[in-house]
């Protein structure tokens, strides 16, 4: 699950990103409204929710919302602002924001509003993803293999293993280029090495082998990777 964060207050932006990453989101943080908009126009990324401050340099959060809606972009937007008067709330919602949170706020409230918004997102997925005999328990960072009677085998996952499996399980039987995985699963401000996807895939396969869990992810030479649902048990 990927979040677009546009907040020009350095301390708040840094704190928000830290909290959101701990909640297993991939976070792209921009401090400039125009920079965020140009990036959105230039890239095709599957954002779940946008968190946008009202008062931003170059392009305000209000205008960023308007641009999204003018292009019929359904991305849910949570607007942050110190402007808490009723007329400000109305202006924010009329511009296309889906929710409005007045500063200062507590992180627990922001996370609750975020969960509510992401349920409306076109990219929303339930906390459990099941294909064949495999269930990805997102809340507990666990892959559950149901080959025998309960209790089923539970395989603990690192955050990046979880994100990689989640993306592939959301797109079963599709060939996903390594460049697409790198773009979707790593922060835009990170500079991962070119073989980061192949290296992460090796670690994931090694993890599954340690638990005697056949890996349904195929490498398609010259094309990318595919989560092959036909390789799973469907009993």
Image: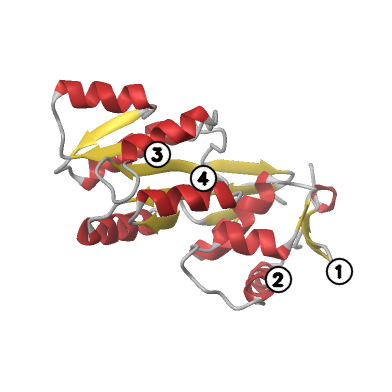
- Residue highlighted by disc 1: 221
Q: N-terminal of the two: label 3 or label 1? A: 3
Above or below for 94 versus 71: above
Q: Horizontally, is 96 left or right of 103 in the view? A: right
Q: Measured from the top left, where is residue 28 in percent x and y?
A: 44, 56
**Separation of disc 2 and disc 1 at Cα?**
22 Å
Which label lies toward us, 4 or 2?
Answer: 4
Q: Residue at x 46, y 52 (%)?
A: 140
**Separation of disc 4 and disc 1 at Cα?**
28 Å
Asked whether disc 4 touches disc 1, contact meaning CB atoms under 8 Å apart, the reply is no
Above or below for 125 versus 34: above
- Residue highlighted by disc 2: 209
Asked whether disc 2 touches disc 1, contact meaning CB atoms under 8 Å apart, the reply is no
Q: N-terminal of the two: label 2 or label 1? A: 2
Q: Residues within 10 Å of mark 1 (few under 14, many from 20)?
A: few
Asked whether disc 4 touches disc 2, contact meaning CB atoms under 8 Å apart, the reply is no
Q: Nearer the viewer, residue 70 or 144?
A: 70
Q: Horizontally, is 91 left or right of 86 in the view? A: right
Which label lies toward us, 4 or 1?
Answer: 4
Q: Residue at x 31, y 42 (%)?
A: 60
Q: Measured from the top left, where is residue 148 in percent x and y?
A: 70, 50
Q: N-terminal of the two: label 4 or label 1? A: 4
Q: Residues within 10 Å of mark 4 (few under 14, many from 20)?
A: many
Which label lies toward us, 3 or 1?
Answer: 3
- Residue highlighted by disc 4: 47
Locate the C terminus and report the quarter of the image it occupies. top right
- Residue highlighted by disc 3: 64
Q: Which mark is residue 191?
A: none
């Amino acid at each position: 699950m990927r979040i677009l964060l546009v907040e020009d207050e350095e301390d708040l932006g840094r704190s928000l990103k830290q909290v959101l990453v701990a909640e297993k989101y991939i976070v792209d943080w921009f401090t400039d409204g125009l920079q965020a908009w140009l990036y959105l126009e230039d890239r095709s990324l599957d954002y779940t929710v946008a968190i946008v401050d009202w008062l931003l340099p170059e392009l305000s959060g209000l205008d960023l919302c308007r641009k999204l809606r003018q292009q019929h972009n359904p991305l849910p937007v949570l607007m942050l602002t110190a402007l808490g008067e009723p007329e400000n709330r109305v202006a924010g919602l009329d511009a296309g924001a889906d929710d409005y949170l007045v500063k200062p706020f507590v992180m627990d409230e922001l996370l609750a509003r975020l969960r509510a918004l992401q349920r409306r997102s076109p990219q929303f997925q339930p906390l459990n993803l099941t294909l064949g005999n495999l269930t990805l328990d997102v809340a507990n960072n666990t892959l559950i293999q149901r080959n025998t009677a309960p209790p089923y085998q539970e395989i603990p996952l690192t955050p990046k293993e979880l994100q990689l499996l989640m993306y592939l399980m959301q797109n079963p039987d599709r060939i996903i280029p390594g460049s697409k995985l790198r773009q979707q699963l790593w922060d835009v401000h990170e500079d991962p090495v070119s073989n980061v996807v192949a290296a992460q895939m090796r670690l994931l396969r090694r993890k599954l082998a340690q638990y005697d869990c056949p890996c349904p992810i195929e490498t398609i030479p010259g094309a990318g990777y595919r989560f092959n649902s036909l390789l799973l048990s469907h009993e």
